[in-house]
Every structure is written in C-alpha cells, then in structure tokens.
Amino acid sequence: MYIDDLPTPALIIEANALEHNLTAMSALFPGTTLRPHVKAHKCTSLAKVQERFGHTGFTCATPREVLGLAKANLNADILLANECVDVARLGAIAGTNVTIAVDSEETIRAAFRAGLKKVVIDVFVGLPRCGCEPDDAGRLADLARSLGLTVRGVMGYEGHLMMEKTADKQHQVNAAMQTLHACAEIVGGDLISAGGTGTYKEHLTSGITELQAGSYALMDTHYATLGFPFIQAAHVVGTVISRSAQWAVADVGLKALGMDHGNPEVDGYDVWFCSDEHITFAVKRDAASLPAPAPLVLPQVGERVLITPAHIDPTMSQHERAFVHREGQVVDEWAIDLRGW
Ligand SMILES: Cc1ncc(COP(=O)(O)O)c(C=O)c1O
C-alpha cells in the first residue's frame, strides 16, 4: 500500500526522517541521559523504537500515558513529570518503576495514598505552571521521606525558554538550572531532570542528568523555525475536495490538527485558514519569483496534499493511528494508543 491509497485525513510518519532524528538526538544524549517525553507522540510503538535507540526511561504527562507504557512493557523507569492528585488508578502498577513529580503537600500525600514509592521534587524555574518555590523544595523532600517515599531528586521545566532565539539563551537556561542545581543539593537523590527539544543544545553543558525532550522525534513547523538538525517526520495527508480559481480546499481541518501554534503549512502554498473539516490554501502570492518548486497552479480536485502541523503534540492526539512509510510505501501502522486522558 502507498500513502496515496490511504483514506484521508491520514497521519503519516516518514521512517527515514524519524530514524534520522532519533540518531541525531541519541548521539548527543545517549542512553538514559535522554528520557523521551511520550506526550509528543502518544504512541508506544514509537516509544519502542526510542527504546531500541538506547533510551529505557520515559517521561509522561498523564497517568493514562503511564498506564499505557506499563501495559506495553516500557516500564523500566517511567517519570510522570506532572502534578497529579487523581493518581489512585496508578496504584495497580505502584510496584513497577514509576516516579511522580510533586510540588505540594497534597501531591505528595496523593502519591503516598496511591501506593507509589518514588517522587521527584518539581521546582519552579521560570515557567508559571507547576513547580514549588525553590525555598520549599527541602521541606517537601523531608515530608515525602517521612512518609516512606524515595526522593529521587529534582525536576524543573524551563518551558518559557524553549522558543528563545536570542544569543542570551544559554545564559538564561544556565540561570534556570542554577536554581535547580541549588535545590538538588538540598533535596538529595541523583536525578536532575529538565529541558525539552527547544533547549537541548543548552543542556549539553547545563549539568542536568537527563533531558525530557519529545518533539525532536517528529517535529513541527514551530520548532523548525529554530534551525535544529531534526527534520519533519510527521505529516497529515489530505485530499483536495474543492477548488476555485483563487483557492483550493482539502479535507484536513481543525479536528485533524493541533492549531494552538497557528496554521499548518501546505507544501509550497499559502494557507488561508482551517475550519472543522477543511483547510483553504492558495498559490503563494510571490510564487513566480520564488525558486522552484513553489507551484504556480492549484492542485486539482482529487489530488493529494501534504500538510505539516504547527504543533505536533495535539496533532498526534487527534488521530487513532499513524501510517509509517518509506518513500511513500506504507511499511507499518502504529496505534496512537496513549491518546485521550
Ligand atoms: C514537563 C515537560 N518536559 C519536557 C517537555 C518538552 O517537550 P518538547 O521536547 O516536546 O518540547 C515538555 C513539553 O511541554 C514538558 O511539559
């Protein structure tokens, strides 16, 4: 089967591009120095490929992702890098190697009640989301230990710096990590977990013990603006279903894409907008002056178009399956089995 035979919209993953990205990142962060974040792809089949590249620990954002990884036997060392009070459902796998992030008395007590055994203290390093005040990290670690929990160390997510493009980026990441290192001294344990695709370069020298990157595997147009060595591996294939003299419409809309980073791209064309089931695009205004292959004409009804998502995580979670292909030939079908809540 070829990708041209798939019912659309269809999520496709280019195997060579995926392998290129996994090779590039694992060369920089080998083995357990990379803890791939599964929220970016929501797919245990893809996580198994990451495992084959040497990464045996995984990062999760939800209990459902943790349970999915455990079910797929990807449970050597799972970090739920997110605060969660409703963790009772993790009790069933509490004996396995699950560590949960905590930043309050409530989240520590919830982990304890669920029978979980290991925590990391999540520290605020600049993104106003989760993470305790640095001054509170020691007290929380003491509380967790008093309940019999193992405190494996600290984590801190500097999400506000992912898209930073100034020359000052290294300095800003170092400053955020200085806070984390100071807390690590007080908290103890051997884990200092942080970062993401956007700050992988800065973490080559930041002194953390592991990077929590996810998007590097499949990429999106948002991260592509940073000029990283990772290439686009995931697209959504659409079919042109209508056409006027000025624009064409394909069957890939909001329900097949994550839109919070803006419009996706249609190779060679200008995207006007997306609605529930449609994407409207046109010939680039300056197409004539651009080097080939910017097309000067719109595709015909029935032709296929390749759509590149602006944000990979929410795009993946819109699809039940991904078709893996090499040069257009479908070689595998992967369930996006960690999707949902
Ligand atoms: C806790 C945490 N760690 C790491 C990441 C990095 O993910 P990515 O590499 O996809 O930017 C995220 C993304 O939101 C996150 O929430």
Image: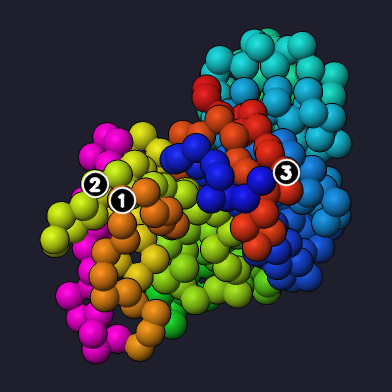
On screen, 244 above or below 165? above
Q: Which residues are magenta?
A: 271-290
Question: Which residue type carries mark 3?
Answer: Asp
Tally of numbered discs: 3
Note whether ligand 1 is within 8 Å of mark 3: no
Q: Is residue 287 magenta?
A: yes
**In the structure shown, which secondary structural element does the residue marked by tag 3 occupy?**
strand
Residue denoted by label 2: 242
Give residue 152's position: percent from left, percent from top: 77, 39
Q: Is residue 152 rendered to the left or right of residue 314?
A: right
Which mark is on residue 332?
A: 3
Give residue 149's position: percent from left, percent from top: 77, 25
Which mark is on residue 301?
A: 1
Label 3 neighbour load within 10 Å: few <14, some 14-19, many 20+: few
Of badges 3 and 1, nearer the viewer stands: 1
Label 2 neighbour load within 10 Å: few <14, some 14-19, many 20+: some
Q: Is residue 237 rendered to the left or right of residue 64?
A: left
Q: Is residue 195 visible?
A: no
The earlier-in-sequence mark between 2 and 1 is 2
Q: Is residue 172 visible?
A: yes
